[in-house]
Amino acid sequence: MTQISYESLPMRQVFQKGSWEVKLSFFIMGFSNLVHKQWTKGLLFLFSEILFLLSFFLQVIPALQGLITLGSQEQGEATKTVDGISITVQVAGDNSMLMLISGLAALIFCAVFAYIYWCSLKSTRHLMSLVQTGRPVPNFLTDVKTLTDGRFHMGLMAIPLIGVLLFTILPLIYMISLAFTNFDHNHPAPKSLFDWVGFASFSDVFSGRMASTFFPLLTWTLVWAVAATATTFFFGIVLALLLNTKGLRFKKVWRTLFVITIAVPQFVSLLLMRNFLNDHGPLNGILQHLHLIKEPIPFLTDPLWAKFSIIFVNMWIGIPFTMLVATGIIMNLPSEQIEAAEIDGASKFQIFRHITFPQILLIMAPSLIQQFIGNINNFNVIYFLTGGGPTNSAYYQAGSTDLLVTWLYKLTVTAKDYNLASVIGILIFALSAIFSLLAYTRSASFQEGAAK
């Protein structure tokens, strides 16, 4: 009981009840380890503190100041007189983009040191507990053996964790930070400086000049996600049921024909369908040759036709995936229930409605949620098929079939409005996260798993 009470003491009480070396360890990291002859651990903690203090005054403070100001001196030209001759020289200024990245990296560096400092305090508290209970203090070899035996996974995770911090967390925080700046085509870095503007970009998207583009694209994105998910799911199940019908000949052949679309890279299929549905493409040519139409049908150049064409082409690409999953589920359904229903006189539709479909939906619910979120961010279908077109003069840097994710791409690559693109990225993430959490926690598969 005494050991447990010492190990669970709050750090404030550790400082109050601890001996002089414990109190000093709150200011000099690793001091208690050095006193108890844990030389390697104590020196590592002490070296970490010295390195942090040097970096804090030499690098962290200037980086944090730059994070606050984002620069004050713009790049430009100045006239300089040399031997009575006036020449124009380039004056180096601040780079707001690098200052923002450096400031965020400094914050992450401080957070990492705070964790190391907390580990130092925990080590001090553990030593205090050992001394108070009369247990021996482990040496470095014992600590290494404990690390390799019981905490080997933590050692292996150190390098990947550093990679995640540098290449995932830092870029993510940087992208989010851009939403609160005016980093756009009017303030290109490094030539010009940009500054913090708070929620001005969010206000611009929701109620400013971007609202007339954002809300129509949001509506179309949701319509597209629902339609694309529902059509591939429904027709994929229907196709799976047809291919698993008793007495159907050449099942493997039919199944192979539909699976071939999966073997072809998606962008190849989309580019082929783009040419096939062109105003002067093969489909319009065949229809005109058969005298079924007089003028080419604008499959990809009319806003309404283009949206229907996108949904249809997505069915061509997505149905085989659903068909394969549904086939596996149907083949493993309990035959006793179906046979009992047939004996009781249930029709095939009633069996499908009350037995087959509910069990397929139960198993595929997480997959459906994943497909819906994937369709919200389905960049390939829109980009390779229509490129977001046809153009719409009422939209800013977007076409009639653009999704929020393709609009984000155009805002970044074409318009150079990085702040607006960052806002759209945050909103897409919020939309996807909220829907997936709500839908998944309310699905029957989740509730059945939680009950177990």
Image (tube, helix red, strand yellow):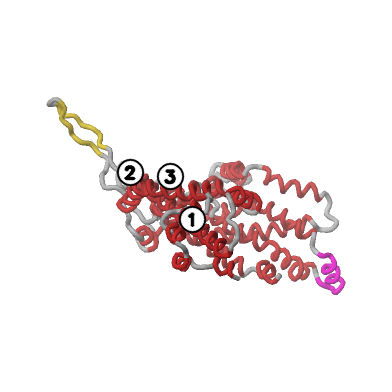
> Label 2: which residue?
95
Would you call the spot at circle 1 few (<14 residues within 10 Å), some (14-19), or many (20 or more)? many
Query: Residue under circle 3?
Result: 413
Between disc 2 and disc 3, whose residue precedes?
2
Can you name the residue that lies furthest to the right here? 343
The crowd level at tag 2 (other Cα within 10 Å; few <14, some 14-19, many 20+) is: many
Side (left or right) of 275 relative to 259: left
Q: Helix or strand or loop: what does disc 1 sit on?
A: helix
Q: Is residue 98 visible?
A: yes
The quadrant in which residue 211 appears is: bottom left
- Whichever of labels 3 and 1 marks the residue nearer the N terminus, that label is 1
- Give the quadrant of residue 270: top right
Disc 1 marks which amino acid? Ser
Q: Nearer the viewer, residue 152 or 349?
A: 152
Query: Callout 3, which amino acid?
Result: Val
Residue under the image location 81 percent in, 51 percent down = 251
The magenta region covers 334-346
Q: Using the image, tell me which numbered label, if any, was put on residue 32.
A: 1
Whole-percent x and y of residue 258?
A: 72, 48
| Residue 187, horizontal then vertical, whole percent | 31, 47
What is the C-alpha distance between the residues marked 2 and 3?
A: 20 Å
